[in-house]
Amino acid sequence: MIRIVFSLVVFLHGLIHLLGFVKEWNLAQVKQLTGATLVALSGSLAKIVGILWLIAGLLFILSSATCLLRKEWWWMIAIAAILISQILIFIYWKDAKFGTVANVIVLLAVILSYGAWSFDKMVSDELNSFLPEKMEKRVITEEMIDNLPQAVQRWLKRSNIIGKEEIHTVHLRQKGEMRIKPESNWMKADAEQYITTNPPGFIWIADVKSSFMYFYGRDKYENGRGHMFIKLFSLIPVVDARGKEIDQGALLRYLGEIVWHPSSALSDYISWEEINSTAAKATMSYGGVTASGTFKFDENGDFVSFEADRYYYRKEGSTLERWVITAEKNYGEFGGIRVPVNLSVTWKLDEEFTWYKLKIIGVEYNKW
């Protein structure tokens, strides 16, 4: 609705500019315009300026249409329209000064759209270098899982990975809600995630909105290194985190999320240790970073939870805290692979802090 209203405003703003063209080319009488200018305009110069009114109007109308059609580059047209329009408004200040208000409104939208476009371009460039070359196909057999703990074997069989092609890439879509602090309100989140398994890595892109603000976020794990980058209104960096603690956290996130690509349990960078009939400890070593976590399953082999000690950011310094991914007893199949669909992510601090609840709405395997 906001997009429709805004596009209509821009369209009407463009139509008003056409009056300047009609006035200077004497195509009709425009009583609302006195023709007063800050500089004297001769007959031929007035007609040239009239053409500029026409160009500005058409550019606003075109930017209105492209905005309505959700073309991410609409702002490029709008910025040209604003520039021409504001020059004309200064020349015809007495008649056109209130057009500055409309130009400022459009300019604010242009700035926000530029931020989103710039962020998307950064992510697109990263994805182009992140995507792996085609991998050798290999089918998972029961013999390949014989040496794993019994709980892990049941999970892999329950996941329907036996007889399926090994997973090399994953593209999944999420919907959910998150909050920054325990006392914060929940914000809606739409996210996409791209995962590679050899080498291990992911790029997670999220659009997070509340009533008064929105964030663009990108979490990345590549070449054994993590990087969290978040912008307020797609413009103002609020998080740009790297370092050893981030590397460890990104590795643990990747490890915990292998429940969405079960064949990764057979990767040579992950080792397993049996705890009991429904739990196993997994240790992942990659890029000079090593971390461990505990997977728990039910008697049927469905994933229940993953727990690990992960660095939690504090102003006075990061501390190791218990971090838990919990499945909400809802499972689905994508490409024949059974995975948990509803999950929550919780920090076990002095009091529990669940900061993210998500639902998987789509998964594609080996499509890149």
Image: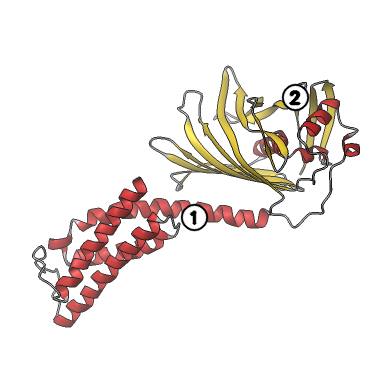
Mark number displayed over residue 230: none
Which amino acid type is marked by label 2?
Answer: Phe
Question: Upstream in the sequence, badge 1 or badge 2?
Answer: 1
Image quadrant in which the C terminus is located: bottom right
Please tell me whether mark 2 sits on a helix, a strand or a loop: strand
Q: Is residue 16 visible?
A: yes
Return the x and y of residue 338 as percentages of the image width and height. Answer: 71, 35
Q: Quadrant of the N terminus?
A: top left
Is residue 331 or residue 113 the one in the foreground?
331
Is residue 143 depicted above or below 330 in this figure?
below
In the foreground, 38 or 73: 73
Which numbered circle lies on residue 118? 1
Q: Which residue is mark 2?
A: 297
Could you tell me residue 55's position as x and y percent?
A: 29, 70
Amino acid identity at mark 1: Ser
Q: Residue at x 45, y 48 (%)?
A: 235
Q: CA distance from mark 1 to mark 2?
A: 42 Å
Secondary structure at numbered mark 1:
helix
The structure residue drawn at horizontal position 85% and vertical position 24%, both measured from the top left corner, is 274
Please tell me in which quadrant of the rendered image residue 12 appears.
bottom left
Give the image location of residue 184, x and y in percent.
Answer: 46, 26
